[in-house]
Image (cartoon, grey):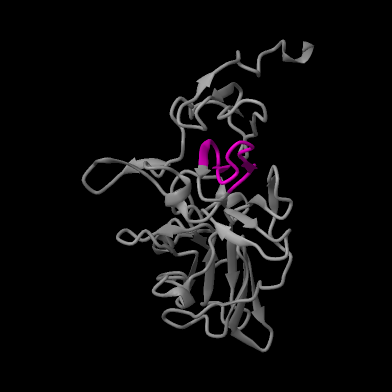
Amino acid sequence: WKGQDENGNDVDGFWSYAIRSTDGGDTWEWLPDAGDYCTGEGSSPQCTYDNIVEIDPTDANIMYLGGSLSTEEDTFNWIAILRRSADGGETWTDMTPAIDPENFLHPDAHGLAFDPNDSSAVWVGSDGGVAYSADAGAEAPVWEKLSVGMNILLFIDIGLHPTDPDYIIGGLQDNANAFTTDGGQMWQGASQGDAGHSAVDPFQPNIVYSHYPPYFFSRNENGGEGGADEWFGPSGEGYVDGLDGSDNWLFYPPFVVDPNNDGVIYFASNYVYKTEDRGDSWFVISDPLNTSDIGSI
């Protein structure tokens, strides 16, 4: 929503908020200190599936809210994936302050469960898997990551090497890219965030491609090694010169690397784009594909 601050300036309101009833739902009051707990990065549909609202089964004053993430202003660390109140929602503390790695929790939290014998011990399920804290009420809870060995990562797509059958690269839902050099026995993570369709360049197979939704095309020139700096170019925003972000892009838009023409890639929104320089620049080669006569093709 849009409103005004205390000085009369126009501002955007929260995209998510918490309210409380103490009379069985007859009346409600806003809990402003809970903040934008499930879409802290602004306009987003995250609350439709990242939305934890739980109350301690032994103490109704202890409440939990969780969802996507917020970003720490100075370090850009992911924080506030979970929030806890011990006073019925009046004040809240960040359970994932990212002070050090043991306080880190993967964003996009979907569920929280209590230990039936000790409600201060909780499990959280997120896009990063399962994590456990033995003391949810701590100032900075320690999270034990329990996902090792669990086959829970979702591959959106994989790309095959033109000559080396042991090399595969894939794009993962909210777990970036991963590649293997031994046919899939061991995988190495790379890049960041979501990654979708992935491919290996047929002419220079040290170059691999993927994208960050919805249209940030990514390229890595070292076989997939490295984080965002090695994937998203000098600007940090991907190889998007010539792409129109206002097009109708799928969350994981498709692209195809031309096996016959060096450097040529096709990338599709409701238009088809072409690059002849491996993504450095793009140009449209089609009419819009969502017109009324598309069904006659």
**Where on the picture, by quarter, is residue 289?**
top right
Decide if residue 115 is on the left or right side of residue 238: right
Quadrant for the N terminus in the image: top left
Q: Residue at x 62, y 25 (%)?
A: 261
Quadrant for the C terminus in the image: top right
Above or below, comparing residue 68 to residue 239 in the picture: below
Where in the figure is residue 95, as x and y percent of width and height? 47, 73
Work out whether residue 146 can be spotted: yes
Work out whether residue 108 can be spotted: no
Residue at the left extreme of this rendering = 7
Where in the figure is residue 23, as x and y percent of width and height? 56, 66
Above or below, comparing residue 83 to residue 120 in the picture: above
Q: Residue at x 63, y 42 (%)?
A: 200
**Where on the picture, by quarter, is residue 55?**
bottom right
Front one among 267 and 8: 267
Magenta stretch encompasses residue 56: no
Q: Residue at x 52, y 53 (%)?
A: 191
Above or below, comparing residue 169 to residue 238 in the picture: below
What's the magenta region? 195-218
